[in-house]
């Protein structure tokens, strides 16, 4: 016997804007709602399936393309090349014709102003940065669909400046279209 327990709320999903019930059906708010599967003591063996493979939009602002192509820039040394370099990646994002990458982790959107102009990177957490992320920082984003301002040198595992970035995370298929999602401020009192 298989029992499914689902905490249902009639509230609106903060990621997709729809009802949470519709979001569950579309798997876009899977972390916002709890799904627990419990087996009875004498339940028959249930075949398990591999974790669902989501897709993340993979793009960067067009300015980044010149940094990938320049011999002395080294941007390609630190980041994987996205599927698209396009202004459609910038806010507000236009997903029409945008490339996606398979992802078993969270999708990320990074916004920075290194050149004075807002620059955007979108992709899967495991295929965006070649050196990965600091665990203590990325762990915050792995728990909730959220946006938060962090310093680049606290996020990326390579020597970089302390430029502030707005980083948004989400778990779901093609969920990283919006960078203006809700902000979650975490305060720690000692």
Image: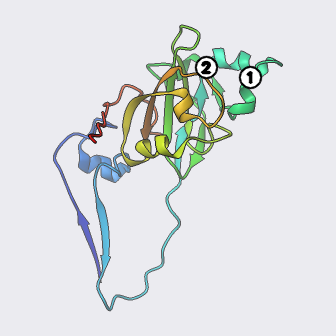
The one of 88 and 118 positioned closer to us in this rendering: 118
**Residue 151 in the image: x percent, y percent?**
49, 26
Q: Residue at x 64, y 14 (%)?
A: 63
**Residue 92 in the image: x percent, y percent?**
43, 19
Q: Is residue 126 above or below residue 71?
A: below
Q: How dense is the environment of label 1, judged by Cα within 10 Å: few (below 14), some, or many (20 and up)?
A: some
Left or right of 122? Residue 186 is left
Image quadrant of residue 131?
A: top right
First along the sequence among labels 1 and 2: 1
**SS for dot 1:** helix
Distance of label 1 from label 2 (alpha carbons): 13 Å
Closer to us: mark 1 or mark 2?
Answer: 1
**Residue 36 in the image: x percent, y percent?**
30, 67
**Residue 94 in the image: x percent, y percent?**
48, 23
Classify the position of the C terminus by image quarter. Answer: top left
Disc assigned to residue 24: none
Image quadrant of residue 115?
A: top right
Q: Residue at x 17, y 50 (%)?
A: 9
Q: How dense is the environment of label 2, judged by Cα within 10 Å: few (below 14), some, or many (20 and up)?
A: some
Q: Count up the numbered dots.
A: 2
Classify the position of the N terminus by image quarter. Answer: bottom left
Q: Do the residues bearing badges 1 and 2 touch, measured as CB atoms within 8 Å? A: no
Q: Residue at x 50, y 36 (%)?
A: 108
Q: Residue furthest bottom?
A: 42
Q: What residue is pinned by disc 1?
A: 68
Q: Residue furthest front?
A: 190
Q: What residue is pinned by disc 2?
A: 86
Q: Is residue 114 above or below residue 134?
A: above
The one of 27 and 103 positioned closer to us in this rendering: 103
Q: Residue furthest right?
A: 71
């Amino acid at each position: 016997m298989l029992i499914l327990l689902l905490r249902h709320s009639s509230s609106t999903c903060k990621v997709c804007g729809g009802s949470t019930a519709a979001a569950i059906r579309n798997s876009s708010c899977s972390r916002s709602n709890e799904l627990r599967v419990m087996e009875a003591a004498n339940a028959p063996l249930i075949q398990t399936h591999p974790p669902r493979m989501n897709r993340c939009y993979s793009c960067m602002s067009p300015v980044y393309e010149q940094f990938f192509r320049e011999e002395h820039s080294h941007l390609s040394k630190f980041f994987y090349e996205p599927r698209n370099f396009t202004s459609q990646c910038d806010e507000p994002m236009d997903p029409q014709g945008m490339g996606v990458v398979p992802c078993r982790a969270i999708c990320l959107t990074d916004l920075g102003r290194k050149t004075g102009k807002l620059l955007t990177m979108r992709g899967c957490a495991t295929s965006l940065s070649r050196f990965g992320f600091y665990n203590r920082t990325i762990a915050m984003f792995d728990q909730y669909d959220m946006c938060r301002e962090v310093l680049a040198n606290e996020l990326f595992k390579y020597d970089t400046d302390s430029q502030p970035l707005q980083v948004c995370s989400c778990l779901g298929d093609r969920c990283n279209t919006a960078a203006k999602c809700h902000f979650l401020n975490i305060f720690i009192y000692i």
